[in-house]
Image (spheres, rainbow, N blue to C red):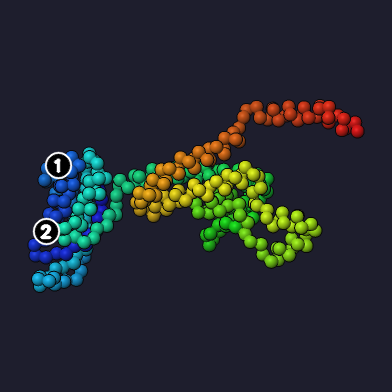
């Protein structure tokens, strides 16, 4: 497991930065019950890059050189508590009396593995969410213009070059594949009406109640679907924060990680609860046919026909 670091330190005639790195690593390994012989520990540290900075004179008149140093830490796979070893090693390097003032960690196979795991989970969540949204909006518009499901929405695709219907058709996608997480929670909101549209509505509707109904109409009017879209608002924020960490390859804060661990099963349950009401049943078509036949032969229907 290779970890990459860059540090800034002040070098004087007595500074042996490599030995400082080795000694600090040895203590971190021992604190986590990892015992390696000195030669093995020595081989774990490899100095890679070095950039010389300014020379400074301290209060005693001694000259120090600012150095930006890059090095790798190669931990064996059998290292106990490798994440703690790396964390404690990095923290100890900037503690007195070490001359190191700054440290940044880059390549990190442990973080990469965690991000990959979270990425798989969020991929599953987002695909399931897009599937639910597609069911909702195809029903709202009854399959008409299926590549324009956001036609009445305030939220629109933010990219400069928007996908065409043909682009989405060839990719087997729809407009929901081009939204970000922060947009999902704002669905089912129409944009403020433009003056021309408002005047047209005034001319089209004689009754005030009809005009009011049109102005306040939501893109999705089914009450169950509208309730589901409203319920997303309290769930997606922490998912987006974790997704952004994954997209930019950075470690999530403890608060983000804890929030994600709570929200991830909750949003999955919310999606599953929605989908379960539309599960396919083998007898659904025959039952539907029987219901149609029952309606055709019902007494009430016969009376109406006779009348």
Horizontal side of 167 relative to 301 (left or right) equals: left
In the image, is residue 234 above or below residue 274? below
Which residue appears at 83% of the width and 31% of the height? 301
Between 124 and 212, the one lying in front of the other is 212
Between 177 and 266, the one lying in front of the other is 266
Asked where in the image residue 62 lies, by quadrant, the reply is bottom left
Residue 156 placement (x, y as % from top left) = 57, 57
Which residue appears at 20% of the width and 42% of the height? 32
Q: Report the residue that reaches farthest toward the right.
A: 307
Does dot 1 land on a helix, a strand or a loop?
loop
Which residue appears at 19% of the width and 62% of the height? 9
Horizontal side of 33 relative to 295 (left or right) equals: left
The label shown at residue 16 is 2
The label shown at residue 92 is none
Residue 181 placement (x, y as % from top left) = 49, 52
Between 188 and 108, the one lying in front of the other is 188
Residue 237 visible in the shown view: yes
Residue 169 placement (x, y as % from top left) = 59, 49
Residue 42 placement (x, y as % from top left) = 14, 49
Residue located beneath label 1 in the image: 36
Whether residues under marks 1 and 2 lie with C-beta atoms below 8 angstroms apart, the answer is: no
Image quadrant occupied by the C terminus: top right
Which residue appears at 11% of the width and 45% of the height? 38
Marked residue nearer the N-terminal end (1 or 2) = 2
Residue 72 visible in the shown view: no
Image quadrant occupied by the N terminus: top left
| Label 1 Cα crowd, 10 Å radius (few <14 / some 14-19 / many 20+) | few
């Amino acid at each position: 497991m290779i970890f990459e670091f860059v540090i800034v330190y002040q070098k004087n005639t007595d500074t042996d930065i490599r030995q400082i790195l080795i000694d600090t690593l040895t203590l971190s390994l021992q604190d986590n019950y990892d015992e390696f012989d000195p030669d093995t520990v020595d081989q774990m540290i490899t100095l890679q890059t070095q950039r010389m900075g300014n020379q400074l004179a301290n209060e005693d008149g001694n000259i120090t050189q600012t150095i930006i140093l890059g090095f790798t830490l190669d931990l064996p796979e059998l290292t106990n508590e490798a994440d703690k070893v790396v964390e404690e090693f990095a923290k100890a390097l900037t503690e007195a009396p070490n001359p190191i003032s700054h440290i940044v960690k880059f390549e990190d196979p442990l973080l990469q593995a965690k991000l990959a795991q979270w990425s798989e989970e969020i991929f599953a969540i987002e695909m399931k969410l897009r599937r639910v949204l597609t069911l909702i909006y195809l029903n709202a518009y009854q399959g008409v213009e299926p590549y324009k499901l956001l036609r009445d929405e305030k939220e629109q695709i933010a990219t400069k070059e928007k996908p065409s219907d043909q682009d989405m058709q060839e990719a087997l996608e729809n407009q929901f594949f081009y939204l970000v997480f922060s947009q999902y929670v704002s669905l089912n909101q129409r944009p403020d009406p433009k003056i021309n549209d408002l005047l047209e509505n005034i001319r089209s509707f004689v009754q005030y109640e009809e005009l009011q109904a049109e102005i306040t109409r939501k893109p999705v009017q089914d009450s169950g679907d509208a309730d589901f879209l409203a319920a997303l608002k309290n769930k997606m924020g922490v998912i987006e924060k974790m997704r952004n960490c994954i997209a930019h390859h950075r470690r999530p804060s403890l608060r983000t990680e804890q929030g994600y661990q709570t929200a991830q099963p909750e949003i999955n349950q919310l999606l599953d609860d929605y989908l379960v009401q539309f599960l396919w049943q083998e007898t659904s078509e025959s039952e539907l046919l029987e219901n149609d036949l029952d309606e055709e032969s019902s007494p009430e229907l016969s009376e109406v026909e006779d009348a």
